[in-house]
Amino acid sequence: MGKIDRIEKQTRNRFLNLYEFFVTRRDGSAGSYYVASRAETAGDLKAVRGDNHPDGVIIYALTEDREKVLLVRQYRYPLGGYVYELPAGLCDPGETCREAAVREIHEETGLLLSPLDVNPVCEKPRFSSVGMTDESCAIVFGYISGELSQDFMEVTEEIEPLLADRDEVRRILREERVAMPCAYHIERFLTDEDPFAYLKAL
């Protein structure tokens, strides 16, 4: 098994930093590995701490009649264009995942989120892209109400919220760029009579 010998922080940014891991590979050779992380210091990295606190939340939310799913079309610099995603955001210090989800939904869409009471394993933080980052996010499920609005959005965000019915979801999956967690959940939205039914199996 490989071993981490030391870690050096390579950048000084507010939300995301690059760390260089100096490692010993399983064959005994030395190497280095680069990891993007939201950790403020090397000591805060999950590889060092050994825990899995969520960095953020992803929200899978439906209208109360279950006929539409809440999506965002967001400009992402790594892609140089727009991609369809589920609403998401970072957790503030001391904030629960559900509290963060309610806040983020209101900020990004103007809507009110009513989180579902689900088995804790359904909201357990999961890792997003383990080959590049130690970031983990929890998924919060719920119903939304109110009217769409961009009045509460941060000026740095380029987000277009939308309520998509099944025909629009099919079009998006066929024609648009879609983030992986979004694609997985909206495929279930298309195929399951009760899109939240699978949560009851855990």
Image (tube, grey):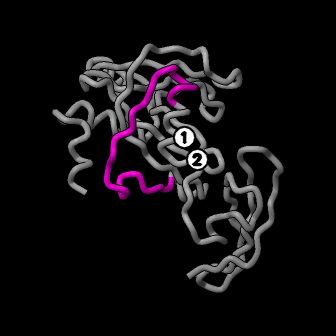
Q: Position of residue 166 (x, y in %)?
A: 26, 22
Instruction: Determine whether 10 is above or below 3 in the image.
Output: above
Residue at 49%, 32% in the rendered image = 87
Residue at 45%, 33% in the rendered image = 86
Instruction: Determine whether 37 is above or below 73 in the image.
Output: below
For label 1, the crowd category at 10 Å Cα-Cα, with few meaning under 14, some 14 to 19 and many 20 or more, is many
Quadrant for the C terminus in the image: bottom left
Q: Is residue 78 left or right of residue 57?
A: right
Q: Are dots 1 and 2 in contact, CB under 8 Å?
A: yes
Q: At label 1, which amino acid type do we have?
A: Ala
Specify the label residue 100 is tagged with: 1
Q: Position of residue 88 (x, y in %)?
A: 52, 36
Look at the numbered disc 1 and give the secondary structure of its residue.
helix
Look at the numbered disc 2 and give the secondary structure of its residue.
loop
Specify start and end residues of the magenta stretch as a single range. Answer: 105-127
Q: Please give the residue where the numbered disc 2 appears in the rendered image.
A: 95
